[in-house]
């Protein structure tokens, strides 16, 4: 029998996550989106005829998630046409009173669900073995993969590890975040290590260049990009929850992994499974034509009802352009959610405004030179360039003054 195997790798679903930043109607949709993204992933697994699905930790946001949510997930997974292997993570650790010891998750025998709460090899079938590294506490300084035994010499068995923790790929990472050495797959002779914990997709190559260790990222996006200054009211159980690895700021995804045989190079494909997309944009505006162009572009995007949008408009508009902002705001209502910032959008300055802000120093001379040039017979292109220079001068001096 061939030991070629294909599986779907998921992690950090955080079902039941308490995202408190939004109004109730949006909050409920975001909670439901995690179930929808799970459905999307299971559909992919069926379409690709996978041998099994791996969930490498944090299926649930914590061990206090409601029975309603835990039952819904259980019902979705219990009758699949393939095994679903679930590893406890640092948000849902396998400990006293955990979800895994309560109804309905304490009775998975006879279903397609396999909860991996012990350091024991799990034989999927002849020629394929899993090595689970379940988490039993929120933090730990111990390498969770340390228990994995070496393979038998000459054995043609595909060896797949599951672990939840931080790959120690730099010195600045905390030591108590379930540290996983970068060379784990080589040390423990693994064909693939299915990771969870970090919310950004990341693949690691061994010394031969083969990608054998990977984080799939969250299956559903859960924040805007780093630097957006936007908090969703949720944080990871780590010392620095604002690290990029825990933002979940990229599209929801899963990894489809195919391993032809023991020792062969895995084929790893990223597949989008997310329900919603979070977009953070800063847009420069110089006149009402720009605003109309931006509005038209945003209005024509596909599936705005599946997008959360955060927009910062900066620049200068005429009084007429400022009036158009109301229409712009109304158009944004077609999006699932929009957070519009216009703090850096100013009225186009009059001559009096410019002179008042610029003053009598060196910048006043720059202003006069631009004005003189605009009064000359110049091309439309050069005229527009000098008009933009006036706007830039006004903005810079205005911001410095503030």
Image (spheres, grey):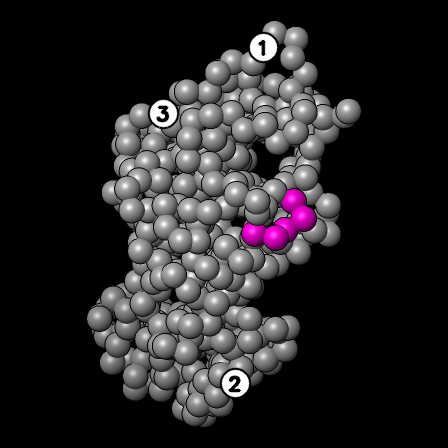
Q: Residue at x 51, y 25 (%)?
A: 121
The residue carrying pointer 1 sits among few (fewer than 14), some (14 to 19) or many (20 or more) residues within 10 Å by Cα, namely: few
Measuring from the top left, give residue 50's x and y in whole percent. 69, 43
Q: Residue at x 37, y 50 (%)?
A: 102
In the image: residue 108, left or right of residue 302: left
Measuring from the top left, give residue 32's x and y in whole percent. 48, 67
Asked if the magenta segment contains residue 169, the reply would be: no
Q: Residue at x 33, y 46 (%)?
A: 98
Measuring from the top left, give residue 183's x and y in whole percent. 47, 20
Q: Earlier in the sequence, mark 3 or mark 2?
A: 3
Asked if the magenta segment contains residue 81, the reply would be: yes
Q: Which mark is residue 152?
A: 1
> Can see residue 377?
no
Label 3 and label 1: CA atoms lie apart by 22 Å
Between circles 2 and 1, the one closer to the viewer is 1
In the image: residue 44, left or right of residue 356: right
Nearer to us in this view, 275 or 88: 88
Q: Main secondary structure of the magenta part?
A: loop
Nearer to us in this view, 303 or 291: 303
Rendered position, 312 above or below 101: below
Rendered position, 381 above or below 151: below
User: Is mark 3 in CB contact (under 8 Å) with mark 2?
Assistant: no
Q: Which residue matches tag 3?
A: 143
Q: Residue at x 47, y 31 (%)?
A: 132
In the image: residue 317, left or right of residue 152: left
Q: Which residue matches tag 2?
A: 331
Q: Which mark is residue 174?
A: none
In the image: residue 153, left or right of residue 14: right
Name the quadrant of the C terminus: bottom left
Measuring from the top left, give residue 337's x and y in whole percent. 45, 75
């Amino acid at each position: 029998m061939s030991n070629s195997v294909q599986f779907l790798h998921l992690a950090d679903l955080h079902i039941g996550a308490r995202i408190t930043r939004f109004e109730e109607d949006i909050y409920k949709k975001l909670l439901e989106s995690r179930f929808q993204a799970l459905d999307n992933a299971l559909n992919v697994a069926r379409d690709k005829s996978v041998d099994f699905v791996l969930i490498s930790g944090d299926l649930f946001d914590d061990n206090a998630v409601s029975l309603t949510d835990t039952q819904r997930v259980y019902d979705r997974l219990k009758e699949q046409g393939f095994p679903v292997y679930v590893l406890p993570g640092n948000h849902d650790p396998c400990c006293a009173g955990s979800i895994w010891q309560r109804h309905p998750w304490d009775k998975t025998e006879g279903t397609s669900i396999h909860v991996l709460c012990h350091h024991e090899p799990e034989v999927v079938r002849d020629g394929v073995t899993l090595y689970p590294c379940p988490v039993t506490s929120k933090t730990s300084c111990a390498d969770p993969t340390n228990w994995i035994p070496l393979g038998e010499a000459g054995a043609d068995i595909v060896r797949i590890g599951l672990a939840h923790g931080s790959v120690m790929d730099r010195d600045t990472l905390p030591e108590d975040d379930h540290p996983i050495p970068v060379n784990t797959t080589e040390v423990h002779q693994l064909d693939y290590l299915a990771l969870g914990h970090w919310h950004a997709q990341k693949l690691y190559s061994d010394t031969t260049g083969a990608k054998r260790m990977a984080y799939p990222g969250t299956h559903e996006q859960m924040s805007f990009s780093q630097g957006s200054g936007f908090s969703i009211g949720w944080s990871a159980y780590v010392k620095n929850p604002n690290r990029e690895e825990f933002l979940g700021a990229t599209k929801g995804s899963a990894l489809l992994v195919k391993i032809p045989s023991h020792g062969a190079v895995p084929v790893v494909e990223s597949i989008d499974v997310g329900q919603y997309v979070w977009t953070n944009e800063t847009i420069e505006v110089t006149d009402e034509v720009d605003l109309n162009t931006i509005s038209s572009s945003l209005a024509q995007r596909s599936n705005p009802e599946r997008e959360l949008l955060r927009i910062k408009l900066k620049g200068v508009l005429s009084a007429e352009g400022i009036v158009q902002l109301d229409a712009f705001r109304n158009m944004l209502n077609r999006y699932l959610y929009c957070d519009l910032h216009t703090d850096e959008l100013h009225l186009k300055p009059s001559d009096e405004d410019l002179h008042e802000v610029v003053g009598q120093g060196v910048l006043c001379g720059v202003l006069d030179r631009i004005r003189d040039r605009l009064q000359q017979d110049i091309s439309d292109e050069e005229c527009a360039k000098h008009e933009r220079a006036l706007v830039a001068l006004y903005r810079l001096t205005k911001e410095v003054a503030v």
